[in-house]
Image: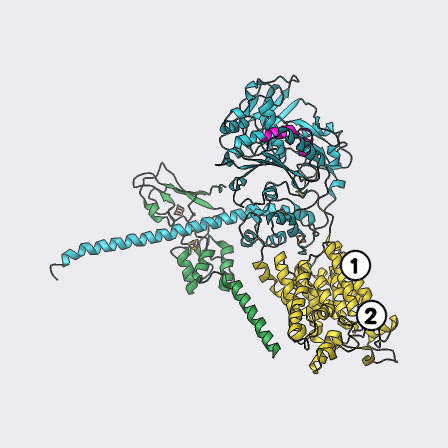
Amino acid sequence: MTFPTAPAPHVVAHDSVGRVMRIVIYALLPTVALHVVFFGAGLLVQIVLGAATALISEALALRLRRKPLEPFLKDGSAIVTAMLLALCLPPLAPWWLVVSGTAFAVLLAKHLYGGLGANPFNPAMVGYAVLLVSFPVQLLQWLPPAGMDIEHVKLSIGETIQAILTGSLPSRLTWDAVTSPTPLDALRTNLKMGMTMAEAQAAPIFGTLGGRGWEWINVATLAGGLALLQLRIIRWHIPVAMLSAIVVCASLMYMIDPGTYAGPIFHLTSGASVLGAFFIATDPISAATSDRGRLIYGAGIGVLTYVIRTWGGYPDGVAFAVLLMNLSVPLIDRYTIPRIYGHAR
Amino acid sequence: MTARELLAGGLRIEAHKQRSTKAPIRAASLVERYVIPLDQHSGLPAVPLVKPADRVRMWQPIAQPAPGISAWLHAPVSGEVIAIEPRPAPHRMGAPTLSIVIANDGRDERFDNAAAIVSFEQISPNEACEHIARGGIVGLGGAAFPTANKLESSLCENGPQLLLNGAECEPYISCDEVLMRERAEDIVFGARALLHALCSPNCTIAIEDDVPEAQAALRQAVDKAADPRVRIKVVPAIYPAGGERQLIATVFDAEVPHDGLPADIGVVCQNVGTAAAIARWIRDGQPLVSRIVTVTGDGVREAGNWETRIGTPFSSLIADCGGYTERMSRLIMGGSMMGTSLSHDDLPVVKATNCIIAASALDLQPRGLEMPCIRCGNCSQVCPAFLLPQQLHWYLQPFDGGQLARHGLLDCIECGCCDYVCPSQIPLVERFREAKPLLTRELDAHLSAHAARARFLARNERLARLEAEHRAKLAEKRRPKNEPTS
Amino acid sequence: MITALVTIVVLAALAGVASVATAGAPREISLADRIDALLPQTQCRRCTFEGCRPYAEAIARGAADINQCPPGGERTAKALAGLMGVEPKPVGKEFGVVPDHPAVAFIEEDACIGCTKCIQACPVDAIVGASRHMHTVIAADCTGCELCIPPCPVDCIVMRPAPAVAR
Ligand code: SF4
Ligand code: SF4
Ligand code: SF4
Ligand code: SF4
């Protein structure tokens, strides 16, 4: 009787890239749901468009690179990229925005560098940065959140799709009536106009903690992120380092001059802080490697996010902060190789 | 804090020991022929003391150690030596190696070993070491390092601390667990003999927290011996807690230097099975001619632990277990994490055979398709050597010797933890195993280039100096001639 | 005002961190040292220089090309090209060829007349022996440069495969 042989270990855990990515997608669902509650079904349309573009681009790139299609299309990484990008876009943004951004992310930021596992930059953030630099106007046209006492225009699904695909609204509405800046953006503009912090935050789009609606979306994101932590898909180093860095910076500046700088709670609950900390910065492929490296990497993102938000030219800094820190990963990795067993420090 | 760092590495793997520990230790059936490979311990092969057609009696020495690191071998049965020839051996992955083949006459006539029985308190530590060597005792944890050689190299001024390894972390192996349950007294006896041979101040027996029955038995035996030097330490059941270096870190909170031995930090580690074997030799005169072998896996009808004479073919043990099931697919010697898979079962049990796994697809779960590394970091979280396997993997293709050395490829203990958790199903350990000799060669070349450069520069300097001296002498010679004219 | 202050403080802190991080870096390694580190140290002079170090200095001066070392082969040529920032190219045939497997010199002791000529030729002091007594090569120290072969008056030196490195 002869038996086939194989190298040790003979038993391995049943895990796959697909499972990891699927869990990330599920963990994003609460965020998506609340997003839809506050801003309408636009996001769903954007995700469908983005996911379709991502899969088509992925298939195209794989075909060009002569790689097997099935395992890579099934691994779910392209869909995660599409979802993260869609979450950063205004819900009624025109279709070509999400399509070109996702295609850019998958084709150039991912496959040009060698595909899954080899991209030095977070593809979704590359896509977003490219869109933000090229089409700033479209990207800043956010919607006012539903509920409370803000004037909010409710669009039906059909009207939403029509708005995204054709750019035309039902005749009863104008673009000016349905759009509003994001809280971070509004804050910046108001402060620029010489308002004090209290006056600036008096606008109805601000809630008790941060941006109205955004507060709850961020809580949902936090829940999803904690689930990822619990399932050991991500580890605590990057989120904790990034959020603490934001808190430290914001508290410092708030203590220096509460009239000009928003407090730490506002920064945590507005914009993409939480999404960035748990879902974007934790993308392992483009993050630093060792635990210590990840602490530095996360803290760097936090500081840069705060700096760009406060003094930079863009309303939210997460995307650029992530990309800048992606850039410094080789350096961080070089100086943070952990001590090996049996070697002196 | 090394202990905490160790907990950060390693894995909790679901144990598969219940099946094999249900029944007590049983004696394996006797067979007609026993095959004793001469190189079944680490170090040099033993030198035969018998020739074909010689009659041997049970427990008679049949091969003596070669000078250096080597061990004695003894006949497991009485009978006739029918050949000394290459036979396939499991520790050589089935390749043939010179072996003594003995035909069993079934009479189990004992060799007169009365002189072997000694009271170890009466002999000097050095004599005790020598005596242990004559029993053919080797480490029974899997590496089969000759015990006497280890003891000799560990002797130090005030005596090293003794660590008995009962932490059997491989998920399928249970031979040490049943040994501790049923023969705890042997272990304690052997421990005290080792304490004497090493002039060691104390002995720690490490046992995992998930084997309460073995713990209780061991506690009882320790209490009975009433020897204050022997203590028990419970360690968490984390793979690979039973790896020598990992166990030392857990128990003593100290690390073995990467280029050194446990003795360098005053510790000597032995397996509990080795201690029990020493007890049988010193107390009963029985050399190491049999050991407990776990036979388990979904590929055999009945699992169990068998007291097996060295040289028994695997196939006989499998037959004792009721034969293979239809699902049988892979034969493994050792554990599921670090064992070697073998292509057939016509191989003898050797001193290192702690476990035979007849694995079915249920045990194995086919590996998924290999995907690119997504740098998830699971592997570095579990690496007990605190390496970054994802970086090692990155620097393998293309091979970057400098970075591989910096990232500690040679410190990888091939435990398989990284492989186990990798979502991309990358066979990391296999790659690391293949790359190690390449890196060693590259580092050697580097070292010799360094030495050659030094000798070249030294030579140039010497030549320049000789040249200068020569010139000076010439000048000296010329000067007196010129003097009168000036 | 505060903005400017904070920016200055942050930048200063970053600069401080950067200087601390790079403080441990080794300083002042000459280009010739770095080239020399890439050369195989066979000292065989096939490159037309008096050894690896002189060749390294020549490259550093710009007086030699990067493709002159046969023992280093393609790997060394590539590494040198990388260091010097030039296009890699194959080792020039005119500099000779070396055997695929590492070899060391061996003196056939019965034939050796003890002339010491090979001792003088060996660039790395790998041959021992006294005048008119049999000489021998220390295999572990021999780089296989073959420089000892031509001077031998009785042709008793042969190249043999290098013994495996004992560990
Ligand atoms: S576990 Fe596998 S996929 Fe994850 S970082 Fe390690 S090698 Fe890469
Ligand atoms: S096999 Fe090597 S690299 Fe992998 S976990 Fe074990 S020691 Fe670390
Ligand atoms: S050719 Fe010979 S002497 Fe010249 S660099 Fe290469 S090994 Fe050194
Ligand atoms: S012994 Fe001969 S071949 Fe070896 S290094 Fe010396 S001169 Fe070169």
Image marks 1 and 2: residues in contact by CB distance under 8 Å: no
Sequence-wise, the earlier of marks 1 and 2 is 1
Give the labeled residue for mark 1.
A26
Query: Which mark lies nearer to you, 1 or 2?
Result: 2
Q: Which mark is residue A17?
A: none
- Residue at 53% across / 50% down in the picture? A344
Q: Position of residue A232 (x, y in %)?
A: 72, 54
Instruction: Measuring from the top left, give residue B189's x and y in whole percent.
Output: 60, 28
Q: Amino acid at mark 2?
A: Phe
Q: Percent x, y for residue A151?
A: 84, 77
In the image, the chain rendered in green is C
Q: Pinpoint residue A78: horizontal percent, then vertical percent.
A: 74, 61
Residue on which disc 2 sits:
A38
What colour is chain B?
A: cyan
Q: Quadrant of ligand 3?
A: bottom left
CA separation in Å, label 1 and label 2: 20 Å
Q: Colour of chain A?
A: yellow
User: Is the residue marked 2 within 8 Å of ligand 1, measured from its CB?
Assistant: no
Residue B185 lies in magenta, yes or no? yes
Q: Residues within 10 Å of mark 1 (few under 14, many from 20)?
A: some
In the image, A126: left or right of B279?
right
Decide whether residue B143 is among the magenta residues. no
Determine the chain carrying the residue at label 1: A
Neighbours of disc 2 within 10 Å: few (<14), some (14-19), many (20+): some
- Residue B223 in which image quadrant: top right
